[in-house]
Amino acid sequence: MSVADTAPPAAPGGPGGPGGPGGSGVPAHARLLMLTNGKRVSQVVYALAEVGVADALAQGHTRVPEIAEAVGADAGALRRLLRCAASVGVFTLDDEGRVGFTEMAEALRADAPNSQRDMILFNGSEVVNRPYGEIVTALRTGRPVFDDIFGADFFSYLEGNPESGRLFDRAMSRMSAATTRLLLDACDFGRFGSVVDVGGGQGLFLAELLARHPGVRGTLVDRPEVVAESAANFEEKGVAGRAEAVGGDFFGELPAGRDAYVLKAVLHDWDDGPAGAILGAVRAAMSGDPDARLVVLEHVVAPGDRWDQGKFLDIDMMLRFGGRERDLAEWRALFAASGFELVSAPEAGRWAVLECRLAGGARAD
């Protein structure tokens, strides 16, 4: 999910429309029922993204029959889906069957700078949807259900299903691009001489960090088959001379003696036990250096009943991995149990920088 998704949603009666669940005059029991339309709306938007309606519209096909022919859809069915989508502000549709863009519909274009198409396709896929069919099981047991449904853990499943794996990688790359800009603006990595990006995938974040800070050298650590794809990203950003890729495991031994260790969107995949083991590996690599820093880039859940997209992502984590999104108190407790103390003041309800140092007297085991 994108950083932009942390904002409150438009009312389902249309942008700001009175027909949405928050609209005036709608009884509470009706608003409650309308909330269950979410699964219908998400699948309608998914289907329109899958066949490429926004791209056909951008190519000049502006009427339902033209678009249907361009994307290989039934015109009657397409009109009905567009009518539903337009009612929540995704596309416009008039009585003559003319279709138009809205700001949200623009983000369905594959070539849009802020395109959400790959993320919407991922969110509409079976790897996201099927676990929700077993949400009551997860509620009763407190355990993830993904492995039982698919016969493998999430990442093993993606390795065995390359098409799903490629979609996941594209969606995460889009999300990473958005969060990278936000997080690099929020943290001055230029004060470090060397940075290790632990679990950094194909190096997109590290490449951007090094491009911004010419005096920093970087090391990427992830599975060997993943970091093998990083060279092109380092070359594209002109940082290949200051970057190295190391195949490894963030539960194992990490490159030691660097100034900063980054964990970007890693810890939310894990419950506190495994997350603490990852932090323990980082602590060992820091070799007791009081000046070294751990920089965790994660969502901080908003308190109380404030709207926060992270509260919805947290359910994905519960169903898929047994992981979790954490509020500030939970982050502090996890760090303290792992020998770190938080030294930054992250804002809740959004992606944030949680900068830590070794706790007083803490040393590598």
Image (cartoon, rainbow, N blue to C red):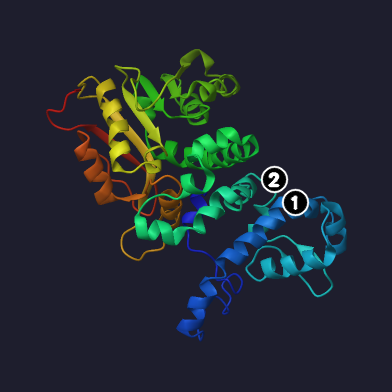
Q: Earlier in the sequence, mark 1 or mark 2?
A: 1
Decide if residue 184 is in sight here.
yes
Residue highlighted by disc 1: 52
Label 1 element class:
loop
Q: Amino acid at mark 2?
A: Ala
Q: Nearer the viewer, mark 1 or mark 2?
A: 1
Q: Residue at x 37, y 49 (%)?
A: 325
Q: Residue at x 47, y 83 (%)?
A: 29
Whether pointer 1 and pointer 2 mark residues with C-beta atoms closer than 8 Å, the reply is: yes
Residue neighbourhood size for the residue with mark 1, other residues' Cα within 10 Å, grouped as few (<14), some (14–19), many (≥20) = some
Cα gap from disc 1 to disc 2, whole angstroms: 8 Å
Looking at the picture, tell me which residue is in the foreground, 340 or 46. 46
* Residue 142 in the image, given as x and y percentages of width and height: 35, 54
In the image, is 66 to the left or to the right of 133?
right
Residue 26 drawn above or below residue 107: below
Residue neighbourhood size for the residue with mark 2, other residues' Cα within 10 Å, grouped as few (<14), some (14–19), many (≥20) = some
Residue 83 drawn above or below residue 139: below
Residue highlighted by disc 2: 110
* Residue 38 in the image, given as x and y percentages of width and height: 56, 66
Q: Amino acid at mark 1?
A: Gly
Q: Residue at x 38, y 54 (%)?
A: 349
Looking at the picture, tell me which residue is in the foreground, 159 or 12. 159
In the image, is 365 to the left or to the right of 44?
left
In the image, is 340 to the left or to the right of 361?
right
* Residue 330 in the image, given as x and y percentages of width and height: 26, 49
Label 2 element class:
loop
Looking at the picture, tell me which residue is in the foreground, 252 or 295. 252
Specify the farthest residue to the top: 241
* Residue 293 in the image, given as x and y percentages of width and height: 28, 28
